[in-house]
Image: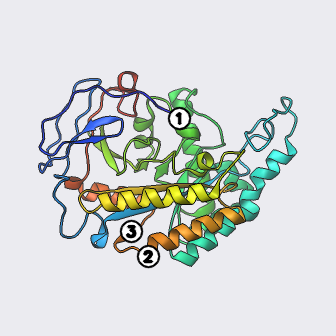
Amino acid sequence: MDNCAPSNSELNRRHALQMIGATAVFATSSRVSSAGVGSEATTGIDAAEPTKTGFWPNGARLAVSLSLMFEGGGQPISGAGGLIPEPIEKGVPDLPTNAFFAYGHYEGIPRVLDLMDKHGIKLSSFMVAKAVTTTPDLAREIVRRGHEAAAHGRVWENSYQLSRAEEKRFIADSVEIIQSVTGQKPVGWNAYWMRNSIGILETLQELGFLYHIDEPSHDEPFIVPVRGREFVTVPYTLHMNDIVAYPFEGWNPDAYERALKDEFDQLYEEGAHRRRMMVISLHDRISGHAARVRVLDRFLSYAKSKQDIWFARKDEIARWALSHRSETPIIVRGSPLVTGLPGPTA
């Protein structure tokens, strides 16, 4: 996870707003300002002036987006992280850990899909290609119910250590497999633990992706220009991520439910004056357990009791950001080798 901070250069705009990980400023002009290597510049609408129709479709003041990681079956059969703290000997199949992952496709995903049907919500499922080939009927069912099929790698492992060509093939293979099984071509990307090579934005752009989620730096989508074209980041989350909120020891569903509601309430309040987005990340083998689905059920009932909420897939959010550029921050970045953040390499 990236802890590098960008430089302190900033644009003079009225009503400057401090953003996580970067100095970002909104202005009424849609002009994109250039920045030197190692710095960022951001433009968008004047965030202090709410619009009459809100910042999202149909006047919504807050977008809520759920991710469902489809990973079970894509993990190595020996050495994958799981419930058991003591590592197994290298190369020995870890039978209980593999069963822990299998819970996701046997029980977890079907239970989460039923919950989404209950609330009429569509989510984005980031699929490991090997997991898709393990349970293809389940992958097809996700798409059949109206959810987005996005890419999460050929197998459940890092790709940043690969060469540029090898990483591109690693991602392209996952796209081809997911499309062949589900009939839907992924336009969204999520890496293993969000870690990519420095050339990832160029690679994704070349492969026809619309967006990625591997940057937990904002509470709204933004655009990074890459080689004269626009590429969308639909930010991910760590603190609203079940794999963090439910540690393997001492997990607390009540605390997670309270955190979900607090996050929602704060962003909903801010949404009266600026565009806000809440992201919730679910994993097949974690949030799909019976008690944890109850937590999600109560939270979704709470969120739906409020007015002007847009529950959206991430491809929908990315397309909305592109079609409403005057309201979308456009961040001009230097090389990741300097900023430590995703951006063009040259």
Asked if one can make out residue 185 in the rendered structure from this viewpoint, the answer is: no
| Percent of width and height locating residue 225 | 29, 40
Per the image, label 1 sits on a secondary structure element best described as: loop
Disc nearest the viewer among 1 and 2: 2
From the viewer's side, name the closer residue of 2 and 325. Answer: 2
Amino acid at dot 1: Arg
Q: Which mark is residue 310?
A: 3
Please indicate whether residue 72 sits to the left or right of residue 266 in the image: right
Residue 195, numbered circle: 1
In the rendered structure, which disc, 1 or 2, sits on the residue that comes first in sequence? 1
Kindly identify the amino acid type of the residue bearing the numbered disc 3.
Answer: Trp
Query: Residue shown at 35%/74% (left/top)?
Result: 307
Residue in the foreground of this view, choosing between 296 and 97? 296
Q: Distance of mark 2 from mark 3, alpha carbons?
A: 12 Å
Q: Is residue 138 above or below residue 199?
A: below
> What residue is at 54 percent from the left and 26 percent from the top?
163
Identified at 23% across, 59% down, the residue is 273
Q: Name the amino acid type tagged 2.
A: Ser
Q: Label 3's element?
A: strand
Of the residues under marks 2 and 3, which one precedes in the sequence?
Answer: 2
What residue sits right under mark 2 in the picture?
Answer: 305
Callout 2 environment at 10 Å: few (<14), some (14 to 19), or many (20+)? few
x and y percentages locating residue 340 in the rendered image:
40, 27
